[in-house]
């Protein structure tokens, strides 16, 4: 028996009732998609959220592209003074002070019989879901996309577990939501008369006593609200694309070397990003290759040690176009193989723990085959292990989509792991969980590791003994210097105590300066150091010169990305 949601839809884009003998020439009902996008996006911190880009396209552009082929028109409410960029198949109006105001303005800006209200911050919109919603609206007059709640729900009292809430019959509401336009206009008028505000339009219609049909949604229809959501959206936008996004300017010249280029060009598979929750993509079991970027600290201040012995940080993290790679494919059980380093392949490995944590949180009964190719030095201050763990979370979220709080899961694995979900540079505060995304210009540089392993535990312990806590970084000054090529006013609070115990790091910093690079600094807890170059060509020439002087050290040209 054919599933109703897979039935063929007439060529007229939207489901239409059959003409009767009484109305053989009845006009086809029209449909408009209405997108309120006048919000400021304060929680994400990147300006108007609809214009934030993932994978080179704004959230708004992705939402419009998914809808415009299924409706007669798309109308968008924008902040006052903003215009639609070229190439977006929609018309724009000025939005209101609230989302509810914007929707009412949109309703008055169209004469369509049926309207779909959609949040631009839900950019991954399956056609099948939209068609099912339109069928439901044609039958009932009001419907919304939603997913049954899968998580355990509790009521809290003073941040403690008070009581469990049965999840049977509970659904998490998504968008789009569909209505007969006149019905939704009536609901908004009643809400305005009563000075009533709702978080969505289905709630206003339900308030009239009208039935609202629930249409099964999709896990990929999550709302991009936090940096962690943005990181997951970036992963979905990159789905099926080779990694890394930018080519390495040059391979490492000696020691801990990356494999030849041919080994990095692993076979990738291309999938639709739209699946149902916890359903593995097993049609093609070939492994996909995922890039796990390194990071550097463009300054690291340790403000204080907390009573729980964690440290309050103030740092600028930047991703690099060098890193490790992971090959991941679906499997019946979880297995890990490490290539390029002598590391365990069980629960002692952070990648394994990340995979196990995601599979358990998503309630996935299957597993994955993971091959980790280590190209970065170990215990080097480049965040390799944290990046590998975050990349594993993102890859499994693609493979087994589910309503899992990735940032919370990442923080349980390590303080640096949430940053690597973000997909951009960030101001990092707290113990690493407070992330403010930042845009950095591409900065060419050289990385140099003298072959010394430094544990973060030791580095912070030495700082505590010396009480070497430092004030906040001058973030505006650092950003200005990076943009102009000037000497950068950053520092690393851990560097003095680490260098005092490992003189080779001081030698590495001096070697970078002697090669004509500027602003040398140790990254993180060490022992990798870096210095900035005038151009990619300058970085490559300097890296070659340093490698000739120190043939036993790991050195490479790189770039922030």
Image (tube, grey):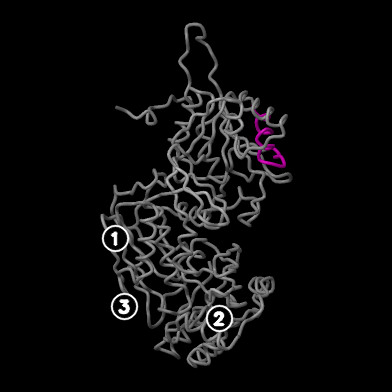
| Quadrant for the N terminus in the image | top left
Name the residue that disc number 1 marks.
Answer: 334
Q: Could you tell me how far apart the alpha carbons at marks 2 and 3 are, in whole angstroms?
A: 29 Å
Is 265 rendered above or below residue 283? below
Q: Residue at x 43, y 72 (%)?
A: 384
Residue drawn at x 36%, y 69% as measured from the top left: 261
Query: Where residue 451 sits in the image (x, y, percent)?
Result: 41, 86
Q: Which residues are magenta?
A: 93-110
Horizontal side, residue 97 vs residue 44: left or right = right
Q: How many numbered markers are drawn?
A: 3
The mark that comes first in sequence, 2 or 3, is 3
User: Farthest residue toward the top?
Assistant: 22
Image coords of residue 44 (percent x, y): 60, 55
Task: Indicate the secondary structure of the residue bearing disc 3.
Answer: loop
The residue that appears at 44% across and 40% down in the rendered structure is 148
194 sits to left or right of 124: right
Q: Earlier in the sequence, mark 2 or mark 1?
A: 1
In reply to whether residue 315 is colored magenta, the answer given is: no
- Tell me the residue that label 2 is attached to: 531
In this figure, which residue is indicated by the disc labeled 3?
342
Q: Secondary structure at mark 1?
A: strand
Which of the two discs, 1 and 3, sits closer to the camera?
1
Tags 2 and 3 in contact by the CB under 8 Å rule? Answer: no
Q: Position of residue 310 (x, y in %)?
A: 53, 74
Query: What is the secondary structure assignment of the residue under circle 2?
Result: strand
- Residue 301 horizontal side relative to residue 124, left or right: right
Q: CA distance from mark 2 to mark 1?
A: 40 Å
């Amino acid at each position: 028996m054919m599933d109703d949601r897979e039935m063929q839809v007439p060529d007229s884009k939207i489901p239409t009732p059959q003409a009767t003998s009484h109305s053989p020439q009845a006009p086809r009902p029209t449909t408009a998609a209405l997108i309120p996008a006048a919000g400021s996006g304060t929680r994400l911190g990147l300006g108007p959220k609809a214009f934030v880009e993932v994978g080179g396209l704004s959230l708004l552009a992705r939402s419009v592209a998914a809808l415009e082929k299924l409706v007669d028109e798309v109308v968008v409410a924008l902040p006052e003074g903003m215009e639609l960029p070229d190439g977006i198949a929609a018309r724009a109006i000025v939005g209101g002070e609230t989302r509810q105001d914007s929707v009412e303005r949109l309703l008055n800006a169209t004469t369509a019989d049926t309207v779909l209200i959609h949040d631009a911050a839900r950019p991954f919109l399956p056609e099948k879901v939209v068609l099912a919603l339109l069928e439901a609206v044609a039958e009932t007059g009001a419907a919304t996309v939603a997913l049954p709640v899968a998580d355990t729900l509790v009521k809290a009292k003073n941040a403690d577990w008070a009581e469990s809430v049965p999840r049977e019959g509970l659904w998490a509401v998504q968008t789009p939501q569909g209505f007969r336009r006149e019905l939704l206009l009536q609901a908004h008028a009643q809400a305005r008369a009563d000075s009533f505000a709702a978080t969505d339009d289905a709630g206003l219609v339900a308030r009239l006593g009208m039935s609202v049909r629930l249409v099964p949604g999709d896990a990929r229809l999550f709302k991009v609200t936090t940096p962690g959501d943005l990181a997951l959206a970036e992963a979905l936008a990159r789905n099926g694309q080779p990694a890394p996004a930018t080519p390495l300017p040059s391979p490492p010249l000696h020691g801990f070397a990356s494999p030849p280029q041919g080994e990095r060009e692993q076979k990738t598979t291309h999938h639709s990003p739209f699946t149902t929750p916890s359903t593995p993509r097993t049609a093609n079991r070939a492994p996909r290759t995922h890039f796990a970027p390194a990071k550097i600290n463009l300054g690291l201040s340790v403000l204080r040690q907390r009573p729980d012995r964690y440290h309050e940080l103030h740092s600028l993290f930047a991703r690099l176009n060098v890193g490790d790679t992971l090959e991941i494919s679906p499997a019946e059980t979880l297995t890990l193989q490490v290539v390029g380093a002598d590391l365990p392949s069980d629960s002692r490995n952070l990648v394994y723990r990340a995979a196990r944590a995601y599979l358990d949180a998503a309630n996935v009964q299957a597993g994955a085959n993971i091959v980790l190719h280590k190209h970065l030095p170990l215990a080097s201050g480049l965040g390799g292990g944290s990046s590998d763990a975050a990349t594993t979370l993102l890859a499994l979220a693609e493979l087994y989509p589910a309503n899992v709080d990735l940032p919370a899961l990442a923080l349980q694995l390590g303080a640096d792991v949430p940053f690597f979900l973000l997909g951009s540079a960030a101001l990092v505060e707290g113990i690493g969980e407070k992330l403010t995304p930042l845009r950095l210009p591409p900065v060419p540089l050289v990385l140099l590791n003298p072959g010394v392993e430094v544990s973060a535990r030791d580095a912070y312990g030495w700082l505590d003994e010396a009480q070497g806590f430092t004030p906040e970084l001058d973030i505006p000054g650092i950003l200005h210097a990076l943009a102009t090529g000037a000497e950068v006013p950053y520092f690393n609070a851990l560097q003095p105590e680490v260098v005092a115990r490992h003189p080779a790091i001081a030698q590495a910093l001096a070697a970078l300066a002697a090669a004509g690079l500027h602003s040398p600094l140790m990254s993180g807890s060490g022992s990798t150091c870096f210095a900035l170059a005038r151009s990619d060509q300058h970085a490559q020439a300097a890296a070659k010169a340093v490698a000739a002087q120190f043939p036993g050290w790991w050195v490479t040209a790189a770039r922030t990305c």
